[in-house]
Image (tube, helix red, strand yellow):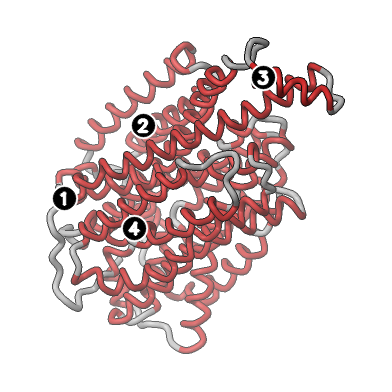
């Protein structure tokens, strides 16, 4: 891809401005869909007649399909050309968005979200590539900084926009808004870039490796999502899915290490910085993404927040990130990336610990503060970790390495969602049982509460139902606190792993574009 960028003349004038805007717009639309549904899950689940935990499939199905399709970007680009593939991805993404909004059952919605995630895979890496080809090589850093800000603004807008749309219109409109944006972006992109198409050639594709990838990742995700409903390994279906996932993964690893044209180049893990960076960005992103899915669910189900208010209090996560990220990017070449990542993990641990102190009396300000601080952790998370992950690799390996690390990160985000929601339910059940032990006629507090409710005109059944609701609220809050505390401990334990990586040494003034290209 680098060669392609050097052969093409940079865009100038209005074409450069419009091209930058439209590529950023397409990226914005894509990234927005990873977070816009988070605060709408309760509304979607209620409308389609399923539980909120089943509703999280709307998030995880998109993430897994997207993760599987990302490693195929390099092969698809050479087969169809960058511009055709990018425009085609936008149009298919737009169609899938329309179908998601029209879905009348959770099964239909999940199927269309899988399609949406699959066709979205090439959009982000190709938007970077086309943007870099639009600017002189000397201004590659500026182009990527502008692109990165777009990917940070989208998660901020996602909860806000999703909450407002859900409360004031209806949840299908979180998908319908993509239609005009997608059509506009596709039309303008084609008009500006169709004469800048890259050469194409027929290449063999590792169909067996791709099939094994779909089998093991799909089986693992279905197992994680169904496990909490089917009592995990007490269910023969879960056991079978686990066996398929394990066997599929082992077969996938063996095949990819021996195939001449692997769909995923696992030999990259032989590099110390690559496996350390990929492991850390996956674990960190999984814990982070699980928390940003869990938080709106807790706020809406047990704290009485509307979707709009849940979006408002979770949106500021991007404020610090937008301010600090350009500073980190501009200075990454002369700083030790390991120190920046260590700082990021310490801030993440602080944020998660602050959340572990939440109670049923927590104010919106108390919820807002750690979210605001978390933006600082995000700003110092992606850029240095991607720098570590891709350091020391030859240019021809960068696209494959970027695709593989993104695959691991996105898959980890889906796993983090499933694990956090599963643990939330199971720990809440445990806390509910412990709290309920005190609700009996021999407990003075219980009797006083029952008498007080009876004096207000409530029947015994109504009083017991209200008390059970209060116990549930307390149990799910305590459970969320448990998960946030575990996440804080995880970030602390990850700090020593950072120092297993070698220090990144790059010449001053070098082009950091390759390293930055995997950031998101």
> Which tag is nearer the camera, tag 1 or tag 2?
1
Q: Could you tell me which secondary element the residue under label 4 belongs to?
A: helix
Screen quadrant of the N terminus: bottom left
Q: How far from the left and from the top, in percent, is residue 304?
A: 68, 42
Q: How far from the left and from the top, in percent, is residue 415?
A: 42, 36
Q: Which residue is mark 2?
A: 212
- Nearest to N terminus: mark 3 or mark 1: 3
> Which tag is nearer the camera, tag 2 or tag 4?
4
> Which tag is nearer the camera, tag 3 or tag 4?
3
Q: How far from the left and from the top, in percent, is residue 94?
A: 61, 56
* Closer to us: 409 or 299: 299
Q: How far from the left and from the top, in percent, is residue 321?
A: 42, 64
Q: Looking at the rendering, which quadrant does residue 360 occupy?
A: top right
Q: Which residue is mark 3?
A: 446
- Nearest to N terminus: mark 1 or mark 2: 2
Answer yes or no: do the residues labelled 1 and 2 have beta carbons within 8 Å?
A: no
Answer yes or no: do the residues labelled 3 and 2 have beta carbons within 8 Å?
A: no
As drawn, 4 above or below 269: below
């Amino acid at each position: 891809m680098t060669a392609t960028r050097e052969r093409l003349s940079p865009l100038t004038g209005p074409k450069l401005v419009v091209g930058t805007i439209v590529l950023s717009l397409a990226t914005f639309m894509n990234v927005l869909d990873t977070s816009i549904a988070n605060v709408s899950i309760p509304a979607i689940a209620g409308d389609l007649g399923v539980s909120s935990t089943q509703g999280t499939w709307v998030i995880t199905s998109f993430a897994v399909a997207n993760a599987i399709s990302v490693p195929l970007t390099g092969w698809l680009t050479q087969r169809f050309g960058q511009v055709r593939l990018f425009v085609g991805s936008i149009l298919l993404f737009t169609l899938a968005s329309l179908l998601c909004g029209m879905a009348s059952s959770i099964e239909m919605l999940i199927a269309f979200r899988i399609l949406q995630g699959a066709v979205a895979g090439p959009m982000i890496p190709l938007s970077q590539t086309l943007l870099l080809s639009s600017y002189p090589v000397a201004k590659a850093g500026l182009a990527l900084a502008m692109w990165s800000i777009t990917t940070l603004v989208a998660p901020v807008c996602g909860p806000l926009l999703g909450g407002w749309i859900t409360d004031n219109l209806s949840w299908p409109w979180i998908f319908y808004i993509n239609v005009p944006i997608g059509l506009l972006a596709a039309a303008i992109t084609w008009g500006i870039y169709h004469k800048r198409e890259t050469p194409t050639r027929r290449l063999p594709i590792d169909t067996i490796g791709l099939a094994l990838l779909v089998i093991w990742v799909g089986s693992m995700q279905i197992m994680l999502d169904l496990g909490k409903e089917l009592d995990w390994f007490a269910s023969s279906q879960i056991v079978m899915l686990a066996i398929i996932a394990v066997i599929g993964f082992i077969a996938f690893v063996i095949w990819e290490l021996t195939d001449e044209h692997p769909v995923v180049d696992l030999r990259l893990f032989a590099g110390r910085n690559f496996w350390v960076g990929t492991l850390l960005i996956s674990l960190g992103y999984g814990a982070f993404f699980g928390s940003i899915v869990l938080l709106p669910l807790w706020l809406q189900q047990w704290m009485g927040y509307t979707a709009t208010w849940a979006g408002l209090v979770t949106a500021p996560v991007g404020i610090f990130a937008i301010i600090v990220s350009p500073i980190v990017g501009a200075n990454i070449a002369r700083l030790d990336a390991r120190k920046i990542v260590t700082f990021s993990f310490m801030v993440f641990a602080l944020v998660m610990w602050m959340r572990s102190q939440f109670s049923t009396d927590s104010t919106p300000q108390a919820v807002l503060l750690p979210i605001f601080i978390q933006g600082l952790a995000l700003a110092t998370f992606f850029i240095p970790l991607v720098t570590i992950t891709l350091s020391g690799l030859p240019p021809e390996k960068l696209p494959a390495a970027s695709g593989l690390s993104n695959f691991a990160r996105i898959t980890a985000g889906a796993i983090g969602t499933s694990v956090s929601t599963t643990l939330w339910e199971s720990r809440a059940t445990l806390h509910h049982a412990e709290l309920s032990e005190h609700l009996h006629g021999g407990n003075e507090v219980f009797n006083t509460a029952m008498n007080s409710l009876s004096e207000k005109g409530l029947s015994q059944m109504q009083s017991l139902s209200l008390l059970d609701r209060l116990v549930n609220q307390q149990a799910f809050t305590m459970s969320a606190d448990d998960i946030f505390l575990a996440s804080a401990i995880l970030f602390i334990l990850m700090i020593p792993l950072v120092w297993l990586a070698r220090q990144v040494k790059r010449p001053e003034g070098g082009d950091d574009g390759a390293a930055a290209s995997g950031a998101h």
